Image (cartoon, rainbow, N blue to C red):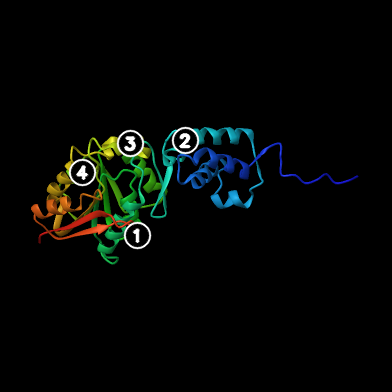
Amino acid sequence: MPTPPVTDHHPYTTIQQALSDARQQLSPTLEAASLEAEILLGHVLQQSRAQLYTWPHKPISDSQLSSYKALLARRFAGEPIAYIVGFREFWDLPLRVSPATLIPRPETERLVEISLELIPTDKTWHVADLGTGTGAIAIAIAKHRPRSQVVATDISIEALTIAQQNATQLKIPNLQFKNGAWCQPLKGMFFDLIVSNPPYITKNDPHLKQGDLRYEPALALTSGQNGLQDITNIVQSAPTILKNGGWLLLEHGFNQGDSVTNLLSMNNYKNISKYHDYEYRERASLGQKSR
């Protein structure tokens, strides 16, 4: 009996076919269509991206395909992929996210990098992360400086719940959380370093109606008419909880560097520096409380 010819056409959908169809659906609107198609399918199948390519001809069940199409529809409509899959990687740490939290950005990793340069490995520093969101900055610092004691604040109970779950999941013992706005819940405590990625987008910025920003909490994004309301608040109140010689490190918009360093100077901070992100845009400013 002759062997039937081999054919590439199957009566079922394979991983390879599902990815190909998804790329075509997403590519008109998304630059990272291939990556996002893989992330979403991996989420449905509970497989890594590497596993998807190890068995590209493996069939997908109808229920899996239906779930995948539902996620693709949400992404095509503009919902951030981090909210769809429920996590985002930051500083090589998998962090749970939700619509109650800002999605951690790669540029914010610069704050961690600068902080780790400042904090000695052989001493116990006290560090505060204001407006922690998912806990990204605080967790990364606490993990890499285990001798330090880190306190993270947020005005949102929902965000603090997510941050606490991330710290527990990642087994970070030297980190505690407090509910409240900026420095308020830290009265009576004193810190060697305060770090914050506060809201810094102007209230009427047109970008708020575009891309992922449409889905993220406005409370974590906007700060008054000029975008500097919260930064001003932090700059003015931080000296009440900074040790003499302690540092304040702030993320800000790429066009706010001069404004923030002027604020620091006007409030008697010394040794003021500006830092660029990985795309060489001004992204952070650092100042030291006078001794």
Q: Is residue 177 visible?
A: yes
Instruction: Tell me the distance, in whole angstroms, between the alpha carbons under discs 4 and 2.
Output: 36 Å
Q: Is residue 189 above or below residue 125?
A: above
Q: Nearer the viewer, mark 2 or mark 3?
A: 2
- Helix or strand or loop: what does disc 1 sit on? helix
- Helix or strand or loop: what does disc 4 sit on? loop
4 or 2: tag closer to the N-terminus? 2
Name the residue at 34% across, 44% down: 134
Farthest front residue in view: 28
Q: Is residue 40 above or below residue 110?
A: above
Instruction: Point out residue 44 in the picture as x, y percentages from the top left corner.
Output: 55, 40
Which image quarter is the N terminus in? top right
Q: Is residue 259 above or below residue 123?
A: above
2 or 3: tag closer to the N-terminus? 2
Give the residue pinned by disc 2.
76
- What is the three-letter code of the residue carrying label 1? His
Which of the numbered marks, if any, corresponds to residue 182? 4
Give the residue pinned by disc 3.
158
Instruction: Point out residue 267 in the picture as x, y percentages from the top left corner.
Output: 9, 52
